[in-house]
Image: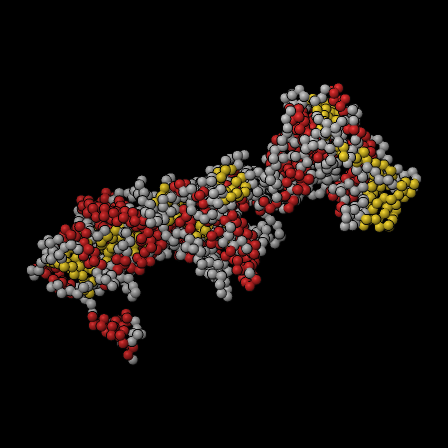
């Protein structure tokens, strides 16, 4: 059914259709609306046989899901930003134990400085945690991928993060086709746990494993993610059969075929990019794009197949490995390391900085000219940076960087000059 | 369901890890000798019959006593219960009232007419001289072993000193008669009013294969008291015997008894009951060193018996008895002071003990008499082959219980002698001491007080003064037993093992260590209430 | 005839009362779980706890009792710590019940999640225990524990209190008593050992959450312990039991003294055994034979310095704490009577 709804609400409806049995909730912007809506649905009886736990922290939220999932309940939670960091120990634990929890990450920058706006710093902080990380481009895809996420997680016995850009998706209203329960039931079987806390068949979960088997356990975790690379497209195809939509897969291409330059990115920014790229192609520039939908597992082979004939790649990402550069770019370079392809790394949209069509086009053109710095900080105000560097050079106690910068850009009135 | 590798494990798999290899010491179960059993002259397995009593298994408990002692009803009255003196519970609160429970069981047997069976006939014949506790005990045990037994005694009634030396108020006669009758029912032949003067001739005439002598010590010990006048000076043994025979005792008016032992007290208390005006016991020792049992002295005083301690009778003039005051010394005996006083008496009774009458054994070649007692080997055999002796006539502590123990021991050795073998007593276990116990686990449970006849009634007759405890109290009292040194299946070892390394085998079967898993921490030993486990070094 | 005390007129006492693990004279229903041949041995042989481990003992006591109380329908969540490490090193587990270890600080939340799952599935016959050591409970797991109390989740949380972080090598926790030596509170300097007037009482904090049931118990008093676990399993909602479990390694005591030390801790007043319902104190286990704290301390090397004359003030402080407990919880009857 088509609905004009907020992204968070759409996701809540999708999760509800998946018949979750335990949902744990802790408020943090911008995922809060999702669990608020789910809480209302549970309380109102719209979701049957479901426990809604108001926990004391994100650490408690994911820990409760670890318990409920191990006890055989389809379990869900959501988080963002600092919340992800606060639960990080449990993030690794859930995947280590192979518990098929689904968690929405309303992607948001992590502090300090504290910032509530969108980038991918939170998801990226957990990129090596062993979870499957699926990035979505739209609220429709968010709905669809959540439904697939439960099936994928339960089939593999691995937790899945559905990463959606905070505010841009979570808080935006758009037209979304919410599937009906029959469709979802047809796609998503009941949860048959691979391991279960059951008095009828006792077992011990979460053993201590020493050097004698730890490597093998880690290898098996990796192996499982490699299996997911096959499974995700298969499930996407099945999903398409039932729901008549292409909403999954590990990579999504946009006019890549034969393109000399391919832009590689993730998440919702592709929406803006598609318009820019279309204009550029109209201007005769050979350029296409793709989004990595499955960041973990990283679809190396799929990307190699798509990019094998490209001359250059411009990676655009909303995250930074401080001291290194672009994270997605690093991953891609590793995938393409034996190809003679130029890979430019552009980092932008950090902490919610707007990405406009105009500045994207300037950036792409710079890339096509192979004039990009490594890494390239998109839409950075270097004058602000330079002024701060001067101040720091001049005096040791140069004051708060954030405040100084805000003053420079005129957000804070120059009150101190009285 | 194939569970994730390594991080998920199948239940119970730790049994593959044999932690027993960590151990340097291993706990072992053992049975130690409880102090009550150790102290019992009759060798009763007291702890075992208390254990059975705890569960209300009175007949079994009684039979357990009867394995060692055919006189529970008698012993429950007259035994001076060294078991209670040595009872470890005495160091916790108060000793278990073993004697009261024994009496309860003995009386239960009489009420219910429980009987013991004689053994399969062996065709051997044993002559017993003396129907006192030692002789009767021997006869009883020999019957259980299947030997024919004839018991000879010069007195008109069986029981020896139990009958003729212990007053009725302590030892009601019907109980004694019933327990003797039980032995007769087992086929022991009692020939009373039959004095044996020549043992060997009687043996040969009766075609006996072995002889047990247990004639006691009946010659009163006397000190020479210079008597000026007609005041009678009597012997305690004779006085008590006449009391029993209901013949004139001579106890009248102001009775003065000389001696500090139980017999002196018995005489004084009998005098009270026979209507004497007063009964005064003149004691050589200081009050605290009197050989008589404290409880008897206490009861006697309640009944009006007076004590004058640290005095020696020096002479009698008319009805005036002259006493010399003594003072305690560092040596064994008090010393005279040269200070004198007099008291008035109508009769003086000497209660200074008895000697063995040795003329009977003087006729038997090979028997050795030394220091007034017949000498026997560890097998109770005298120097004359086939002639055994026990009771007060051999060197020993002269108590009824000791005699009964002699009877048992002699019977075992006679049995071996008749079979042409040697009797080997089982090796004794290590004695369990208080420090080996963990008394935390025993409930606070003060002993049951046996009811007592009121003083007025005690003064006016020979009714038994110490009453029975009832069934509940007997059970209660038995349950106060700490089972020193012997597992009573409290489950502590089974419970407190952090490694679940103890198997519980079920009621009566006790426990077994799983040495595959026992790490040797020793918690079971520490927490065993009764000291029935010990650590031993692991052999490397 | 002397009056026979009323207590003697009926057979009331048994050979060992109810202090030993078993008693062959008791009716089957009054026997302890540990005394039965078919106890579940939830924590079985082959685990790697040290010799004389109080925690291994306490865990079997508690979980076996809970197993009986729930007709074996039990799941346990375990915090990281000794209990977890010594029971479940790959490839062997010593648990015979469904059991999960997740993290150091989240056992209460994992337990809450399991309980929620069971409720969602309509399996409320299956009951949940979360458990951990004092570090995992009073410190790192405290947030999750408080959350579990706050939500009144249907979980019994059992804290095995051995008064320090034993698994990591005996460091101070907020359950470490004043004066005690740990690796982070060494007996050096002016006030050797752990500082006094620090730490917290989680049982009292649990009471402040007004949860249905809070109790403390000790491995020396099995019947009291089993009673409390059984009672707890008869109640729904959040429950908390703290078990006092001596640690021979961390306390420097003889492995064979584990139960004795536990007994002395209670009998000297330093570890009161209490019960509370909905925030109200409802019961205390009276001291049977009071001992000075020194009797308890002298069996443990962690307190060796406290018994030196130079540190007499520390001994006094510990005795004062015991006295305060005795008064506060009325651990000794004024009449001097005993149960």
| Residue that appears at 62% across and 38% down | B478
Is B227 left or right of B67, judged from the image as shown?
right
Which quadrant does the C terminus of chain A fall into? bottom left
Total number of numbered labels? 0
From this viewpoint, which residue is outermost toward the left?
Answer: A284
Q: In this view, does A172 lie to the left or right of B229?
A: left
Instruction: Indicate whether A382 appears above or below C150.
Output: below
Q: Position of residue C223 (x, y in %)?
A: 52, 45
Residue A311 located left or right of residue B352: left
Which coloring applies here? secondary structure
Instruction: Name the residue at 70% across, 26% down.
Output: B386
Tell me what residue is drawn at x 23 percent, y 74 percent: A387
Which percent across, then down, holds residue B205?
75, 19
Q: Residue at x 35, y 52 (%)?
A: A63
> Is residue B243 visible in the rendered structure shown here?
no
**Quick check: B306 above or below A289?**
above
Q: Which residue lies furthest to the front in this view?
A: B366
Image coordinates for residue B37, horizontal then vertical, percent: 64, 37
Nearer the observer, A341 or B416? B416
Q: Residue furthest bottom?
A: A418
Left or right for B131, reference B515: right
The reply to whether residue B60 is in sight is: yes
What x and y, as percent, mark residue A205? 35, 46
């Amino acid at each position: 059914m088509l609905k004009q709804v907020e992204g968070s609400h759409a996701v809540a409806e999708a999760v509800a259709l998946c018949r979750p049995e335990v949902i744990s909730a802790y408020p943090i912007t911008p995922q809060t609306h999702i669990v608020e809506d789910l809480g209302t649905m549970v309380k109102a009886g719209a979701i049957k046989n479901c426990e809604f736990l108001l926990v004391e922290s994100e650490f408690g939220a994911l820990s409760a899901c670890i318990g409920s999932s191990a006890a055989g309940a389809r379990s869900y939670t959501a988080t963002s930003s600092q919340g992800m960091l606060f639960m990080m120990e449990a993030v690794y634990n859930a995947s280590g134990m192979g518990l098929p929890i689904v968690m929405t990450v309303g992607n948001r920058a992590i502090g300090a400085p504290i910032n509530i706006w969108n980038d991918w710093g939170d998801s990226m902080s957990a990129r090596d945690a062993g979870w499957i990380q699926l990035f979505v481009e739209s609220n429709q895809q968010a709905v669809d991928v959540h439904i697939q996420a439960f099936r994928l997680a339960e089939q593999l016995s691995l937790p899945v993060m559905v990463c959606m850009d905070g505010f841009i998706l979570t808080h935006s209203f758009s037209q979304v086709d919410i599937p009906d329960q029959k469709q979802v039931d047809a796609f998503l079987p009941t949860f048959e746990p691979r391991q279960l806390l059951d008095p009828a068949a006792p077992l011990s979960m979460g053993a201590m494993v020493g050097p004698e088997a730890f490597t093998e356990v880690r290898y098996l975790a990796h192996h499982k993610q490699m299996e997911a690379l096959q499974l995700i497209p298969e499930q996407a195809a099945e999903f398409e059969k039932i729901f008549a939509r292409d909403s999954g897969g590990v990579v999504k291409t946009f006019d890549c075929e034969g393109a000399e330059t391919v832009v590689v990115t993730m998440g919702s920014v592709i929406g803006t990019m598609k318009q820019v790229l279309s204009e550029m192609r109209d201007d005769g520039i050979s350029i296409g794009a793709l989004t990595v939908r499955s960041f973990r597992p990283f679809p190396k082979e799929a990307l190699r197949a798509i990019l094998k004939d490209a001359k250059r790649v411009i990676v655009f990402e909303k995250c930074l490995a401080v001291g290194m550069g672009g994270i997605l770019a690093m991953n891609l370079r590793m995938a393409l390391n034996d190809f003679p392809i130029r890979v430019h790394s552009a980092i932008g949209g950090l902490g919610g900085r707007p990405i406009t069509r105009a500045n994207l086009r300037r950036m792409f053109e710079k890339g096509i000219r192979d004039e990009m710095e490594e890494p390239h900080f998109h839409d950075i105000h270097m004058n602000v940076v330079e002024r701060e560097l001067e101040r720091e050079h001049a005096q040791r106690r140069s004051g708060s960087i954030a405040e100084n910068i805000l003053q420079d850009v005129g957000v804070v009135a120059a009150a101190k000059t009285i | 369901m194939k569970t994730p590798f390594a991080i998920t494990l199948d239940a119970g798999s730790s049994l593959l890890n044999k932690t027993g290899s960590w151990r340097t010491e291993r706990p072992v179960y053992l049975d130690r000798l409880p102090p009550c059993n150790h102290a019992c002259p009759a060798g009763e397995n007291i702890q075992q019959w208390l254990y059975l009593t705890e569960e209300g298994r009175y007949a079994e408990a009684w039979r357990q006593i009867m394995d060692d002692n055919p006189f529970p009803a008698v012993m429950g009255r007259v035994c001076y219960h060294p078991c209670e003196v040595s009872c470890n519970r005495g160091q916790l609160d108060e000793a278990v009232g073993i004697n009261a429970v024994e009496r309860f069981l003995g009386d239960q047997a009489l009420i219910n007419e429980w009987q013991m069976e004689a053994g399969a006939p062996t065709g051997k014949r044993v002559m017993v001289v003396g129907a006192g506790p030692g002789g009767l005990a021997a006869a009883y045990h020999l019957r259980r072993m299947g030997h024919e037994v004839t018991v000879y005694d010069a007195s008109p009634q069986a029981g020896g000193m139990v009958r003729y030396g212990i007053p009725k108020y302590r030892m009601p006669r019907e109980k004694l008669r019933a327990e003797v009758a039980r032995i007769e029912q087992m086929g022991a032949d009692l020939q009373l009013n039959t004095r044996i003067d020549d043992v060997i001739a009687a043996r040969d005439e009766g075609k006996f294969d072995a002889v047990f002598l247990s004639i006691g010590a009946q010659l009163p010990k006397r000190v020479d008291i210079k008597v000026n006048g007609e005041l009678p000076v009597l012997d305690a043994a004779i006085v008590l015997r006449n009391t029993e025979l209901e013949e004139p005792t001579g106890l009248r008016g102001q009775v003065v008894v000389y001696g500090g032992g139980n017999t002196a007290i018995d005489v004084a208390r009998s005098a009270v009951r026979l209507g004497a005006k007063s009964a005064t016991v003149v004691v050589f020792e200081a009050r605290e060193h009197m050989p008589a049992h404290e409880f008897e002295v206490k009861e006697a005083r309640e009944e009006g018996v007076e004590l004058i301690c640290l005095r020696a009778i020096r002479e009698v003039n008319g009805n005036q008895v002259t006493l010399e005051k003594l003072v305690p010394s560092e040596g064994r005996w008090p010393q005279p002071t040269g200070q004198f006083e007099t008291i008035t008496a109508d009769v003086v009774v000497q209660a200074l003990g008895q000697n063995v009458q040795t003329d009977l054994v003087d006729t038997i070649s090979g028997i050795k008499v030394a220091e007034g007692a017949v000498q026997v080997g560890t097998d109770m055999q005298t120097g004359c082959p086939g002639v055994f002796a026990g009771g007060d006539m051999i060197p020993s502590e002269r108590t009824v219980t000791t005699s009964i123990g002699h009877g048992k021991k002699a019977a075992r050795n006679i049995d071996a002698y008749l079979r042409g073998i040697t009797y080997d007593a089982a090796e004794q276990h290590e004695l369990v001491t208080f420090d080996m116990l963990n008394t935390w686990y025993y409930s606070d449970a003060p002993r049951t007080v046996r009811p007592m006849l009121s003083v007025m009634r005690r003064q006016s007759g020979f009714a038994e003064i110490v009453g029975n405890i009832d069934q509940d109290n007997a059970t209660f009292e038995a349950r106060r037993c700490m089972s020193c040194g012997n597992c009573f299946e409290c489950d502590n070892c089974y419970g407190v093992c952090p490694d679940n390394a103890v198997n519980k085998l079920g009621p009566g079967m006790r426990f077994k260590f799983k040495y595959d898993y026992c790490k040797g921490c020793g918690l079971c030993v520490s927490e065993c209430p009764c000291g029935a486990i010990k650590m031993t070094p692991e052999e490397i | 005839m002397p009056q026979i005390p009323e207590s003697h007129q009926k057979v009331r006492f048994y050979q060992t009362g109810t202090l030993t693990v078993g008693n062959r004279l008791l009716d089957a229903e009054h026997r302890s779980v540990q005394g039965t041949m078919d106890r579940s041995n939830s924590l079985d042989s082959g685990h790697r706890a040290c010799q004389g481990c109080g925690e291994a003992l306490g865990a079997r006591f508690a979980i076996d009792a809970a197993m009986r109380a729930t007709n074996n329908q039990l799941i346990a969540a375990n915090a990281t710590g000794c209990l977890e490490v010594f029971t479940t090193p790959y490839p062997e587990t010593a648990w015979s019940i469904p059991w999960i270890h997740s993290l150091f600080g989240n056992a209460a939340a994992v337990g809450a999640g399991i309980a929620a799952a069971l409720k969602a599935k309509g399996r409320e016959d299956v009951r949940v225990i979360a458990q951990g050591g004092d570090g995992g409970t009073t410190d790192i797991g405290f947030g999750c524990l408080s959350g579990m109390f706050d939500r009144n989740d249907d979980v019994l949380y059992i804290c095995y209190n051995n008064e320090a972080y034993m698994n990591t090598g005996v460091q101070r926790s907020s359950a470490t008593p004043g004066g005690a030596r740990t690796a982070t509170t060494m007996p050096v300097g002016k006030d050797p050992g752990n500082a006094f007037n620090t730490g917290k009482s989680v049982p009292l904090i649990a009471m402040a959450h007004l949860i249905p049931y809070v109790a403390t118990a000790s491995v020396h008093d099995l019947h009291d312990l089993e009673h409390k676990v059984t009672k707890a399993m008869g109640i729904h909602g959040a429950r908390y039991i703290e078990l006092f479990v001596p640690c021979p390694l961390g306390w420097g005591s003889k492995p064979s003294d584990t139960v004795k030390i536990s007994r002395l801790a209670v009998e000297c007043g330093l570890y009161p055994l209490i019960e509370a319902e909905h925030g109200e104190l409802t019961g205390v286990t009276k001291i049977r034979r009071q001992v000075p704290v020194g009797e308890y301390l002298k069996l443990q090397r962690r307190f060796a310095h406290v018994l030196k004359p130079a540190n007499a003030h520390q001994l006094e402080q510990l005795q004062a704490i015991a006295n305060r407990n005795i008064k506060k919880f009325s651990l000794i009857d004024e009449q001097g009577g005993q149960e």
